[in-house]
Image (cartoon, rainbow, N blue to C red):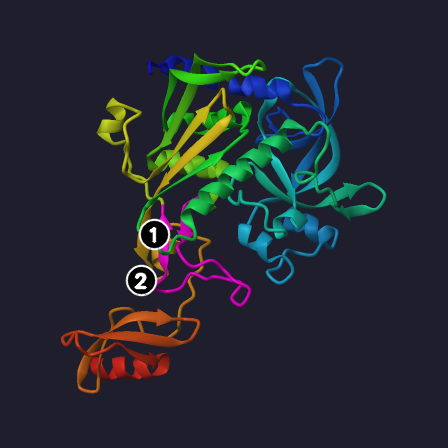
Amino acid sequence: MNQRCNNDEVAARVVTVLPLLQMSIAVGDYVKFNTTLHLRESLGEVIGMGRDADTLQVKMFLPLTSLVMKKYSLPPLTATSHPLSCQDNLPEVYQAEEIQYIERCSITDVVFIVPVQEIESGRFFLSGATNAFLIRFTMNRRHGMLPWLETFYFSRRVNEPISVRLFHAVNALSNHIRRCLFHHPESLTTCQSFKLPNYSPEFFWYIFYKVFNYCTSIMLHRKQRAVKYYNSLKMESVAKQSTFIYLRILTKQGFEALQKCLGIGIRLGLSASRPTIKQPIGYCCINSNVTSIDCPDVVPADVVANPRIKCHTNGIDLIFSEENRILSGQVRFTKFIVKESADVTTRLSTAVVNTIESGVYLEALFFYNNTLFEVSEINVAENTVRSTAVQDHDVPDVYLSVDAVQTLVQQFGQ
């Protein structure tokens, strides 16, 4: 099997991603663009074409500020009515009646304008992505603010705009990375793999474009043997050339850039049993097993010398086969036990750890029946504590209530 590496071809393709994206924008796409009228980037929906193919007519999206909400008496998002939307904390916008004409060259990115109903459905995984926005209302000149009822991203049309197809591809990739981090309590491995068939090249190169400056990449051309089947029932062994693009995110900067594209939730996972009908929700508690992708500051020296070498440090590898349209991924992570809430909140600020508000903590010491015990596990759901004898290992573990252990720990401290 012959292999030929080409890094110049990778760089050449990445340079063309944005111009090709600009040319692919059509009616129905949501875009981010620069204009001379606004100091910052603006958002809009393409609703028509201009006088030529390079001019687009867009309907603006504006931030839903507290002044706008007060002016039109709009209800705020609450944890009771919209628990997932409040948790995701996406920037909220509304569609105004302002219409502008822009040039294709002013487009900097596509954006995902996601209705609140779709976020609450649980099918949205891009929380924290820089180009994801929440929408609830649209402006109508006669009736004022009206509810936004468009279920755009989860509809199926004959010809979907590229921003819609791109949303599905990025959202699916984020979901598969999360699956690698969750639900492996019985496994000792710290590496998980997945495959996404029928993955479009334009979507892979879009992700590549987002993280190219902070990752390690290489393109390989391989000659592989394949079997060709004929209608005459003849088989023939032939040689075909396959192209593989390796995208390796191995540093903190690269992983932060990937989070801006796939959402902040790809950092942590809960290594616990799957929810069931009797226990439909699983929480992160003290003493829970958690998985985390903690990338180093620099790329390992052996990977710099050979980008294809097997790597054991935390990170994410994406391998795309252009001919087969298969995106393969490998996620390497670290497992640890939560000792305190800061263990996870320092990695993901939105993470929640269920704790018991008492003086009981892991590795706390106390005397019970003239034996020294150490707190080894705190069961938040049942409000009990399992403790292990420190010196005499023949003594079985004891299970006590939190209040009882709290009193014993205070007595031991005094």
Residue 136 drawn above or below residue 202: below
Residue 143 image position (x, y, % from top left): 84, 46
Residue 118 image position (x, y, % from top left): 65, 47
User: Element type at marker 2?
Assistant: loop
Question: What distance separates the C-alpha of mark 2 from that of mark 1?
Answer: 21 Å
Depth order, front residue of 410/301: 301
Residue displayed at 33% across by 81% down: 400
* Labelled pair 2, 1 in contact (Cβ < 8 Å): no
Residue displayed at 48% across by 42% down: 176
Depth order, front residue of 43/363: 363
The answer to whether residue 11 shows anywhere in this view is no
Location of mark 1 (residue) = 187
Name the quarter where the C terminus is drawn: bottom left
Residue displayed at 33% across by 44% down: 294
Residue 247 image position (x, y, % from top left): 39, 27
| Residue 85 located left or right of residue 221 | right
Depth order, front residue of 348/272: 272
Q: Residue furthest left?
A: 391
Residue 243 drawn above or below residue 115: above
What amino acid is labelled 2 in the image? Lys
Sequence-wise, which precedes: disc 2 or disc 1? 1
| Residue 100 located left or right of residue 181 | right
Q: Is residue 261 magenta?
A: no
Name the quarter where the N terminus is drawn: top left
**Would you say the magenta stretch is mainly helix, strand or loop?**
loop
Location of mark 2 (residue) = 339
The magenta span reads 266-292
Q: Is residue 267 magenta?
A: yes
